[in-house]
Amino acid sequence: MSTHIGAPEGAIAPVVLLPGDPMRAKWIAETFLTDATCYNEVRGMYGFTGTWNGRRVSVQGTGMGQPSAAIYITELIEHYGASTLVRVGSCGSMVEDVQIRDVVLASGACTDSAMNRLRFSGLDYAPVADFSLLRAAADAADAMAEVRSHVGLIYSSDSFYPARPELPKRLADYGVLGVEMEASALYTIAAGHGARALAVCTVSDHLVTGAETTSAEREQSFSAMIEIGLSAAFASQHQAPPTFSVSGS
Ligand code: HPA
């Protein structure tokens, strides 16, 4: 048992999918997993463990925003031994080329949050995805003919309703594709514990055009995202550090 996750030791798999919405965790478990059981109901932040293609996997809601997500991510890694964590959530598109229902694989996450500034005493750490997961997810997305996917930076904002909406536009000018609220903390905490992390996001709304997905469209694109996340988690292996042999003359 940990503070916010009331599961006994061993109840959570090493591979964990992380939707923000706990009801989405329930939907993922019911739709994609076999023999899923609920291991957490504390604060209504549901967590389930089951199997996917015979592999044990958990799904844990994180809530919205980095402070909430960081609690669950830290406890999953430190108390339950999670080693592969894949956020599956929505993002708002910040650029014309990324359309609603597209999938964004976040190579890195910018943020306006103070969490990393405090952790690194003012240094600007660059939170990035695990490359083995990112590569496997890009391959899985490419293999799905109906999915338009993009690999690039996202922006993990502390504010859904930003006080200075002109600032995200600056990030878009520098190649940031979408905005969500959790990936930066996920990448940082995972890296600090030697765990692998990736954020896969479907575009639910468009900050430039104002377009929004219907709930039926959201469900369809969410399904593709879950398949991509699960395929990536199990396709990719931990990369052994490279060994260099320097041959002298
Ligand atoms: N802002 C922040 N998070 C989001 C958004 C957004 O516009 N859309 C989906 N998640």
Image (spheres, rainbow, N blue to C red):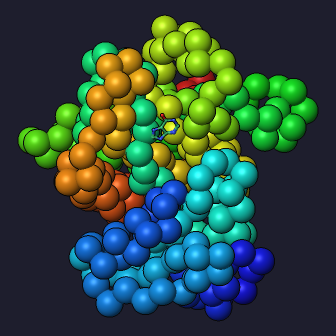
The answer to whether residue 191 shows anywhere in this view is no
The quarter of the picture where residue 184 lies is top right
The answer to whether residue 68 shows anywhere in this view is yes
Please indicate whether residue 194 sits to the left or right of residue 47 in the image: right
Q: Residue at x 32, y 47 (%)?
A: 136
The quarter of the picture where residue 168 lies is top right
Residue 158 at x, y = what percent? 67, 37
Report how many numbered discs are placed on residues in the image: 0
Please indicate whether residue 102 sits to the left or right of residue 178 in the image: left
The quadrant in which the N terminus is found is: bottom right
Q: Residue at x 70, y 29 (%)?
A: 112
Please indicate whether residue 7 sits to the left or right of residue 58 in the image: right
The quadrant in which the C terminus is found is: top right
The quarter of the picture where residue 50 lies is bottom left
User: Which of 172/123 is in front?
Assistant: 172
Residue 140 at x, y = what percent? 23, 48
Q: Residue at x 44, y 29 (%)?
A: 178
Q: Look at the picture and state if 166 lies above or below 7.
A: above
User: Which of 232/168 is in front?
Assistant: 168
Q: Look at the picture and state if 128 lies above or below 182.
A: above
Residue 212 at x, y = what percent? 30, 36
